[in-house]
Image (tube, rainbow, N blue to C red):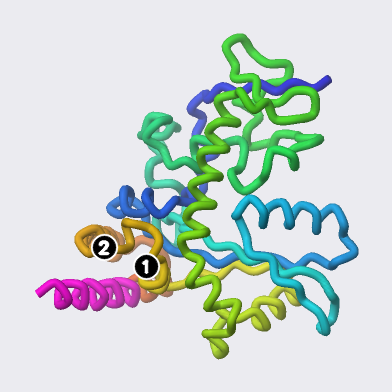
Amino acid sequence: MTTYGFSCVDCGRCCVHAPRLTIDEAFRFADTFLVFPVLYGAFFPKDQKEAVDRIQADKKAGLIHVVPVTGGKEDGFLTIGICLQAYRDLANDMCPMLDEKAGKCRLTNSERPLYCQAKPLSPFILPQHYKGYTPDQTYSYCVHEPPHEGDDIFYQDNKIQKDSILAKNQKKAREAIAYDFHAMHLLLSAILQGAFPKTILSVPVLYQRCMEEGSFQFPIPIDLVFTTTTMHPRTRDESALQNFYQQQIGLLKRITEAKWGNHQDQKTMKTLLTHHQKVLANLMKGRE
């Protein structure tokens, strides 16, 4: 019987990538992270029963849309999800909350994004899909088998232990992600109904990308999310939106003035800065 215990040792290994954020966290960390909505997904042939069962479970949990695909190269299911991805800058996605000298996060565990609090588990993987779990090498310092004294025993008898701290954090993060996913249903429905036929935001284009590369991951403008996400109270609060854009503009200015990244990254960030300034100006005009 394999039993895994967890205790954070502040090694900084899981901080090499900035986290995914909930909508609430995007507003809370607007002066810290560049925030980009990311559309992601993959294609699964219908004869892959285990994979199909898993994506149907993910759909039931409110984490993805599942689109049946027929008449193409292969019949199966296209999965489409959306999340808010945080970045330090476009050339370096190491988490800005990592104190590189000390090798640990500047935030306490309760202050961290829910995505971070759930590590080494993922909010995007349901507990029943952890059968035969083997920890990633990234977590070799904090996940112990056999457990150390004082560890959080999170995996035993071939399953996640629901009463463990990690499992509870994972559940909390998953529920927040599912709520955000539901909140963005207007945008996702528009994509599925072909509202953006000449862009990447269309089922045929996403399916084609899966046929070529196996999966897809596309950043999309955040104002597109905010203007169609009418269920979440933050996106209906003009003061909160104004503050968000002001903080993102300030962050972009600091990044471009510091000349982080390569030339193309700088050009992209300056374009994003101009875009955010226009969105903010329209918000301000609407309040006059």
Magenta extent: 270-288
Q: Are marks 2 and 1 in contact (CB under 8 Å)?
A: yes
Instruction: Report the residue at 87% width, 60% height from top.
Output: 48
Of 27 and 107, which appears nearest the observer?
27
Q: Can you see residue 235?
A: yes
Residue 267 in picture, x, y percent from top left: 36, 76
Badge 2 density bin: few <14, some 14–19, many ≥20, Cα 10 Å: some
Q: Is residue 203 magenta?
A: no
Q: Can you see residue 254?
A: no
Q: Residue furthest top?
A: 149
Q: Which amino acid lies under the numbered mark 1 shown in the image of this protein?
A: Phe
Against 139, residue 265 (above or below) is below
Q: Quadrant of the N terminus?
A: top right
Q: On the image, numbered disc 2 is attached to which residue?
A: 241
Q: On the image, numbered disc 1 is attached to which residue?
A: 226
Against 274, residue 61 (above or below) is above
Secondary structure, mark 1, is helix
Instruction: Report the residue at 30% width, 63% height from top.
Output: 236
How many marks do you count on the picture?
A: 2
